[in-house]
Amino acid sequence: MGYIKYIEDWNEQDRTWDGKEAEFTPGEYAAMASADYDGHCGTMNRYNKRYGVKNADSSVKMVMGGLAFLSLDYIKRMKSWFELNRPDKKFAADVLNFHVYTFPEGSQFGDSGPALSPEAGRLKEQLREIVEYRNQNLPGKEIWVSEFGWDLHPDSRLSVPEIGTMDRQEVQGIWLVRAYMALAAAGVDRAQMYMLRDVNPNDKTQFASSGLVGPKGDLTPKKSWYYIATLKKLLTNMRFLGEEKSSDPNILVYKFKDIKSSRGVYAVWAKTSKDYKADNFPLPVSPGVQQAQMVSLLAGSLSGRM
């Protein structure tokens, strides 16, 4: 009926923490994905039954389960299994999918220290490696980051810090916006923060306070709700065009272009994890720009301060 565009196949199949009975090796997951994709090239079809997403609706894209670890090796080993075992040697997923949290040393679970900002955690650089591999070896596949984010509870290992006069709600909202910027610059096709609402803001468990709004029965918008809404409004139909050279090493300038008009956006922010401010910063604007309007993130506003 055309309602379903994507189907995700499992979740965190590389879950080493639950033991071998819960974890898929890359080969095991590739075997299941091949069956779910098109009935392993149709070889499973028998008795007038057809198996696989593509046999149900060839336009539906299959999303591999989001990996808990940002592992390029897992993708490479899946690719090897497909090439060795599928008759068409095709990579049996349309989307490469990852969950990414920014801790020191690339850890995903906070065992190496407190959570870092998108820039300190090298979010863009980590995903850029995946994108470059996709471009060279799996062209046409989408790349998703279907989990990223930060908690507000001060005792959570995923908590954002208070910085200067900014409370944790402020920092969470800013870091989420900067994360979307980093993922766009890396070339990621889709990104989904985790998650919409809190489970319990009073619980220090990782992910319990990572929402844009409060828990069930409350759902009060946080500052991050307004910041993400503003980001969405300003960057609708926009595509990342490149990074502009900045006169201040602490400040990043990203350029976005509207695919449906001549409009564009310069996104400007300090990439530090301190209360850094720069007065009279000279913005490098492309020749021909005749008019511009500055928009700042503003709690309580879905379109920012103009």
Image (tube, rainbow, N blue to C red):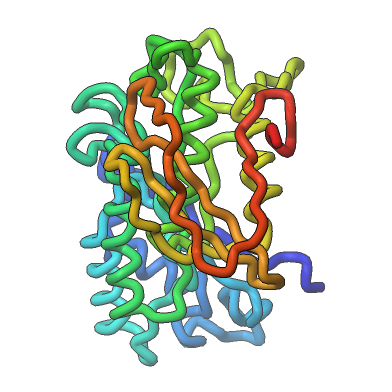
**Residue at 34% across / 76% down in the picture?**
135
Which residue is located at x 54 percent, y 19 percent? 169
x and y percent of residue 247 in the render?
A: 32, 47
Q: Is residue 150 visible?
A: yes
Image: 56 above or below 75: below
Residue projecting furthest to the right: 1
User: Closer to the camera, 226 or 84?
Assistant: 226
Q: Quadrant of residue 248?
A: top left
The x, y position of residue 155, in whole percent, is: 38, 10
What residue do we see at 54% from left, 47% from top? 192
Tell me what residue is drawn at x 61 percent, y 35 percent: 296
Q: Is residue 95 left or right of residue 260?
A: left
Q: Is residue 295 above or below residue 45?
A: above
In this picture, residue 13 sits left or right of residue 216: left
Q: Is residue 289 left or right of residue 30?
A: right
Residue 65 visible, this orientation: no
> Residue 137's spot in the image, x, y percent?
30, 79
Query: How many labels sit on residues?
Result: 0
Q: Quadrant of the C terminus?
A: top right
Whether residue 169 is situated above or below residue 143 in the rendered picture: above
Q: Nearer the viewer, residue 189 or 53?
A: 189
Q: In the figure, 238 relative to 246: above or below?
A: below
- Where's residue 195, x and y in %? 57, 35
Quick check: 100 left or right of 172? left
Nearest the eye: 306 or 68: 306
